[in-house]
Image (spheres, rainbow, N blue to C red):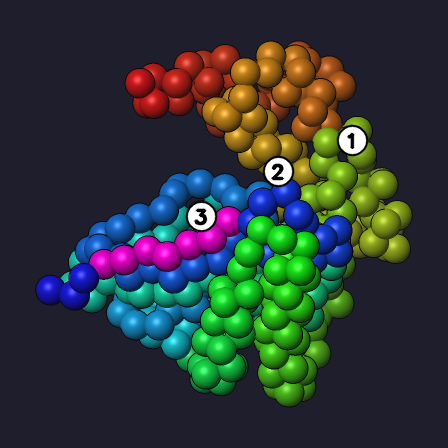
Amino acid sequence: MTETYKHSYKSGEILMTSLSVYNTGYQRCEAGYQWGPGVRDHYCIHHILSGTGYYTVGEKTWKLEAGDTFILYPGVEVKYYADQQEPWEYAWAGFMGTDAASIIRNTGFLKERPFLKRGNVPDDQIRNGLEQIYNAKGNGYEEAVAMTGALYSLLSVFMHYHEGEDQERDAKLLYVEKAENYIETNYSYPVTVEDIADYVGISRSHLFRSFQTYMNCSPKEYLTEYRIQQACRLLKETGLSVSAIAYSVGFENNLYFSKAFRKVKKTSPTEYREKHRKKKE
């Protein structure tokens, strides 16, 4: 039986504004080892070094193997777990910053297909990039800059090979991704669909059609569900009152927040919090 291990590093308080490595590491998982369902507040790229596992986003589950690379998007609930017979081993790098979303939009990763199969990008370049990030780890400012530099280099590899595919991105998809980025950054403010459409630079009806094509929902539904996701995280992880959480995720009316929460989660915010507190006990 192959021995399992985990080597990981999490950055301290020194984080660059534009792009920063949040965590990095290597892990060989035990059979069936699972993370989630859960939500990260940062991007995280995993490259599979050996073995097999499964990655679930929403109703979709993909089987991934050695040489494949998958990404976690901030605010998106995911689950991933190792195969029972051939559990995977992977390296990862988590990151955040104002440059992150725009860079990822220029790689081959898509929210609808958040992984790259083996061969899209040379395996050795991904491995080397992740190794450089890990080897540069440290709590000092110099190390933080070195990790960020290595991360930029790795992301540029993904961008290079995506451009090499010479594929034109559909304009509607670009509108949706730009809107998602705006929502991720501004959901805590009382923004409206009109604000999102103005930011993207298209009409509200055009934005609606774009979301229906790629997300199978309206921009308003997506914004509401994203806010509810963030509210769930705050209900589980903080002691903030329900009204404070409502305000924190962009709802100025507490009653409307409760109705929207119940519509999405089929329970009230208070009941949701109590249920998850009992799970921890």
The circle drawn on residue 78 is: 3
The vertical placement of 231 against 132, above or below, is: above
Going 31% across and 18% down the picture, which residue do you hit?
281
Amino acid type indicated by mark 3: Val
Answer with left or right where residue 277 lies relative to residue 32.
Answer: right
Q: Earlier in the sequence, mark 3 or mark 1?
A: 3
Q: Is residue 7 magenta?
A: yes
Q: Position of residue 135 (x, y in %)?
A: 50, 67
Q: Which residues are magenta?
A: 4-10
The vertical placement of 20 against 268, above or below, is: below
The answer to whether the residue labelled 2 contacts the one labelled 1, judged by CB atoms less than 8 Å apart, is no
* Residue closest to the eye, 142 or 150: 142
Quarter in which the N terminus is drawn: bottom left
The circle drawn on residue 226 is: 2
Where disc 3 sits, the SS reads: strand
Give the residue number, with chain letter if any, for mark 1.
189
Answer with left or right where residue 212 lies relative to residue 261.
Answer: right
Of discs 2 and 1, which sits in the foreground? 1
Answer with left or right where residue 210 lies relative to residue 23.
Answer: right
Going 67% across and 60% down the picture, which residue do you hit?
142
Going 63% across and 53% down the picture, which residue do you hit?
140
Q: Position of residue 230 (x, y in %)?
A: 59, 33
Q: Earlier in the sequence, mark 2 or mark 3?
A: 3
Q: Is residue 151 visible?
A: yes
